[in-house]
Image (cartoon, grey):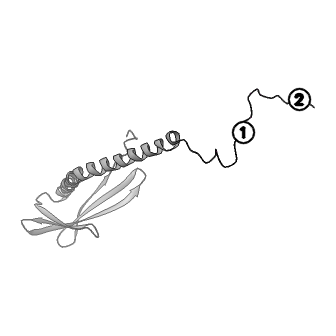
Amino acid sequence: MTPVARSNKPPIRIKRGEEMSKTNFRADIVPILFLTVVVCVSVIALAYVDSITYEKIETAKLEAFKEKLSVHFSDMTDFTSNDANDCYVVFTDNNTIGYAVKAVGSGYGGTIEMLVALEPTNQYRDQKYYHKKNPRLKV
């Protein structure tokens, strides 16, 4: 038999149930409290920024959609929407000049939107595809 190498350190003796239940407050609890405070402050800051920018973002989306509609209806002055099925009624001086229907699907690079314009007689007028380009692809 080969002899087993022993270290010069004395063996650690732990009394049963006494030393194992004690925690070091600084080492165990303070990092958890610090991270909890950081997360709470971050959530409050994000909620505040969202409340400030929400209206501006919605206004910008509405203006962008008005631009899309004006491509199909150049004499458009206003429109109303039915958000349940993405149908839009387009007006010029309170006269209906057409309808627009938005269809959304998923493509390889993200969502693809199609806007179909219809005459007041429900005949096809025009269509256009819109998609968000993937910024990682240099096309």
Which residue lies most toward the top here? 8
Residue 87 position in % (x across, y down): 24, 68
Q: Answer above or below: position of 47 versus 123.
A: above
What residue lies at 74% left-to-right and 31% top-to-bottom?
Answer: 10
Q: Answer above or below: position of 75 versus 32.
A: below
The label on residue 1 is none
Which residue lies most toward the left here? 93
Is 38 magenta? The answer is no
Q: Which residues are drawn in magenta?
A: 7-18
Q: Nearer the viewer, mark 2 or mark 1?
A: 1
Residue 129 position in % (x across, y down): 30, 55
Name the residue beneath numbered marker 2.
3
Cα gap from disc 2 to disc 1, whole angstroms: 24 Å
Name the residue beneath numbered marker 1.
13
Q: Amino acid at mark 1?
A: Arg
Residue 82 position in % (x across, y down): 23, 69
Name the one closer to the observer, 49 or 104.
49
Name the one closer to the observer, 59 or 116.
59
What residue lies at 82% left-to-right and 28% top-to-bottom?
Answer: 5
